[in-house]
Image (spheres, rainbow, N blue to C red):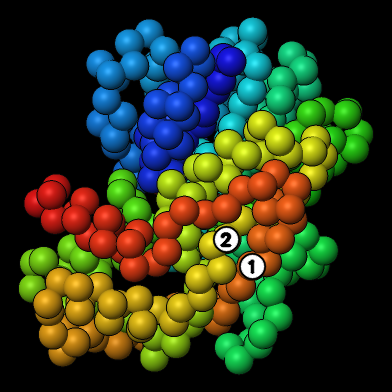
Amino acid sequence: MNMIVTGGAGFIGSNFINYWLKRHKDDSIVNIDMLTYASNPDFINKEQYGDRYTLIRTDICDRELIMQHAKGVDTIINFAAESHVDNSINNPEQFLHSNYMGVFSLLEAVKKYDIRYHQISTDEVYGSLPLNSATKFDENTKYNPRNPYSATKAAADFLVNSYINTYGIRATISNCSNNYGPHQHEEKLIPKTIRHALSGENIPVYGRGNQIRDWIYVEDHCSAVESIIEKGRIGETYLVSSRNELENLQVVKSILSYMNKSEDMIQFVKDRPGHDEHYAIDPSKIERETGWKPKHDFEEGLKKTIEYYLGEK
Ligand SMILES: NC(=O)c1ccc[n+]([C@@H]2O[C@H](COP(=O)([O-])OP(=O)(O)OC[C@H]3O[C@@H](n4cnc5c(N)ncnc54)[C@H](O)[C@@H]3O)[C@@H](O)[C@H]2O)c1
């Protein structure tokens, strides 16, 4: 298979390219990434894959270039996005550009060349559950994005579904919960906590730290996308999580405990405006239809993650 993976120099995309090329020895991947601050092309060791891997530095909104590269490709998987909610609150325009217009540009190429397409989306499109709720998001939950990041991701999902319905493109969508693991940018909770614990700086925690997120180890997200590409039904959406809901404060405390650091390092800071309280995902559909199961529990995934950042220092 000849694939385009977009955003492959970022956190999840780079883990996906390494995951895929190690397991699918006859496949080749062109990584289209504009190399924003969140990326690092060295996350992928080019030498290891020879001519099976190429990096092209460009914006996915550049329709002419996307058309050129898409010709002859079997599959496009779109990881490229602006991904940090705080940045979307301060500067939403770039999010509209990359997360919405970028998807439009890819879909036009998909339509023209009849390419299989997969859109990487997020559980944040469903909005927020009350803290004490036992409800979980599933594929029938109504979209209710509550910040500019999740609104652009939701808009992109609607656009993908409109292309499936109107033009009959062969596409799927996955909405995954919060990822953690190697290669994540320091702006996000887990790498920030590890880095600050290492350098002895205070660890900022929003509000009272009682927001609940559903954490999945990045490699399990990669295997979920592989399952959808191989066994998912065209036109369908799949929710992905490893059923691991934790309060942010609990996550920070687990990291400090593993690193033998004091909880006195925690500093509660003013909460993010409109901060979603609680995400929870029911992954029954992907499990039932593709047989996918996550392989890492939180303790094991967190240990691997901390060791990665310790090794980097
Ligand atoms: N991180 C999570 O917990 C999480 C959870 C669910 C879904 N997602 C989704 O997964 C995808 C990847 O997230 P991530 O955490 O790896 O993000 P990231 O910020 O680490 O990486 C994004 C990558 O996309 C590239 N990019 C951004 N805009 C681009 C553009 N216009 N053209 C080309 N390249 C561009 C960046 O250079 C970067 O390499 C995103 O679509 C995000 O919405 C992330």
Circle 2 — which element?
loop
Question: Which residue does the image show at 56% across and 68% down from the upper left?
Answer: 243
| Residue 126 visible in rendering | no
Looking at the rendered structure, the kind of residue marked 2 is Ser
Tell me the tag on residue 281. 1
**Left or right relative to 12: residue 264:** left
Question: Which residue does the image show at 61% across and 64% down from the upper left?
Answer: 124
Where is 98 relative to 91, above or below? above
Whether the residue under disc 2 has CB within 8 Å of ligand 1: no
Q: State the residue in front, 62 or 309.
A: 309
Circle 1 — which element?
loop
Work out whether mark 2 precedes mark 1 in sequence or the reverse, and give the earlier one. Answer: 2
Q: CA distance from mark 2 to mark 1?
A: 6 Å
**Left or right relative to 190: residue 146:** right
Q: State how many labels appear.
A: 2
Whether pointer 2 and pointer 1 mark residues with C-beta atoms closer than 8 Å, the reply is yes
Give coordinates of residue 52: x percent, y percent.
42, 13
Tell me the tag on residue 241. 2
Tell me the tag on residue 257. none
Give coordinates of residue 42: x percent, y percent.
25, 31
| Residue 141 visible in rendering | yes
Q: State the residue in front, 215 or 191.
A: 215
Give coordinates of residue 169: x percent, y percent.
82, 28
Whether the residue under disc 1 has CB within 8 Å of ligand 1: no
Question: Which residue does the image show at 50% across and 42% down from the upper left?
Answer: 222
Where is 280 relative to 34, above or below? below
Residue 134, picture quadrant: bottom right
Residue lying furthest right: 166
Quadrant housing the N terminus:
top right
Looking at the rendered structure, the kind of residue marked 1 is Ile
